[in-house]
Image: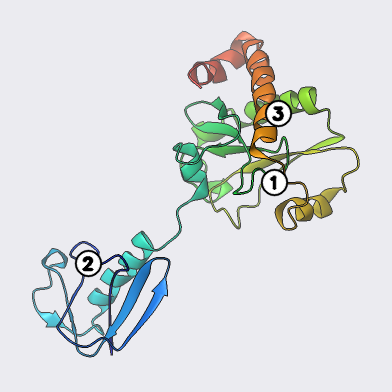
Amino acid sequence: MYWTLRQAQGGLLGTAASWLAAPTVSISRMRGFEFILLPGIVHAPPSAMLRERTPLACPSIKKVLLLLLREFIMEKCLGCEIVSGNINTPGGILYEDEYWTVTHSTASNGAPLKGMLILQPKRHCTHLADLKLEEVENFGLILHNTCKAMDAILHPMKTYACSVGETVKHVHFMIIPRMDGMPIGAELLKQILEEQKWVCSFEEAADVAIKIHGKLDSLLYGLNDKETRIVKDGYSNG
């Protein structure tokens, strides 16, 4: 038994695989694609530089199909989608320079917590240790001023800044205002991320985000000359 695949909407995935005229044995669906098991062999595409019909047991054919699975079926990176503007966030971009962005957190049902911000690099990176020197150079200053702006608008009991990167692999820092009456530490994170206890509407989040944006703007333009050289040029276009 050998594998081939096509999109559920019909047609081939480019010219990466084609199948012989043979009855379909079974079909299973996964994220909009059909995996079709055919008795026989898979015909490798010319672009793969494999001119003859070759059984799928051939490692090169397996490699082609694995690359297809990775490229077409793997979920898109949420961080990259936000950075590229494909996903709208409440209040839009609050800060942007050559390397970093700050946005309000977002979810399908609004936002996980009013005032919860996301600081993340523009470049797709999944490990903190892989950040480049130029990316970390002004990270602390951005984080500092973002927290100051949040404190000025929301007056939280405590401001958390943490990075986990397990569900969304793209490196990001959650900047979380712990308001009066909220639990502390891990329990608050559980309520926000798992139980969705503090969800607010997109409009509520946008209202707070716009206010934080305004305060952040005033903080950045009030920096001394040395600090301004680090961040102002990139932010002025944000």
Indicate which disc, 2 or 1, sits on the residue closer to the N terminus: 2
Residue depicted at 61% across the width and 16% down the height: 227
Residue depicted at 34% across the width and 76% down the height: 35
Q: SS for tag 3? A: helix
14 and 129: which is toward the camera? 14
User: Which residue is labeled 1 in the image?
Assistant: 112
Q: Mark 2 packing: few (<14 Cα in 10 Å), some, or many (20+)?
A: some
Disc number at residue 153?
none
Q: CA distance from mark 2 to mark 1?
A: 39 Å
Please state the horizontal and vertical placement of residue 58, each as a whole percent of the image.
Answer: 23, 82
125 and 77: which is toward the camera? 77
Q: Indicate the quadrant where residue 1 lies.
A: bottom left
Please state the horizontal and vertical placement of residue 2, each as a whole percent of the image.
Answer: 27, 85
Note whether 204 is above or below 197 in the view shown.
Answer: above
Please state the horizontal and vertical placement of residue 72, each as a whole percent of the image.
Answer: 35, 61
User: Which residue is labeled 2 in the image?
Assistant: 12
Q: Amino acid at mark 2?
A: Leu
User: Which residue is labeled 3 in the image?
Assistant: 208
Please indicate whether residue 50 sits to the left or right of residue 12 in the image.
left
Indicate which disc, 2 or 3, sits on the residue closer to the N terminus: 2
Residue depicted at 67% across the width and 42% down the height: 174
Q: Amino acid at mark 3?
A: Val
Please indicate whether residue 162 sits to the left or right of residue 78 in the image.
right
Note whether 175 is above or below 142 in the view shown.
Answer: below
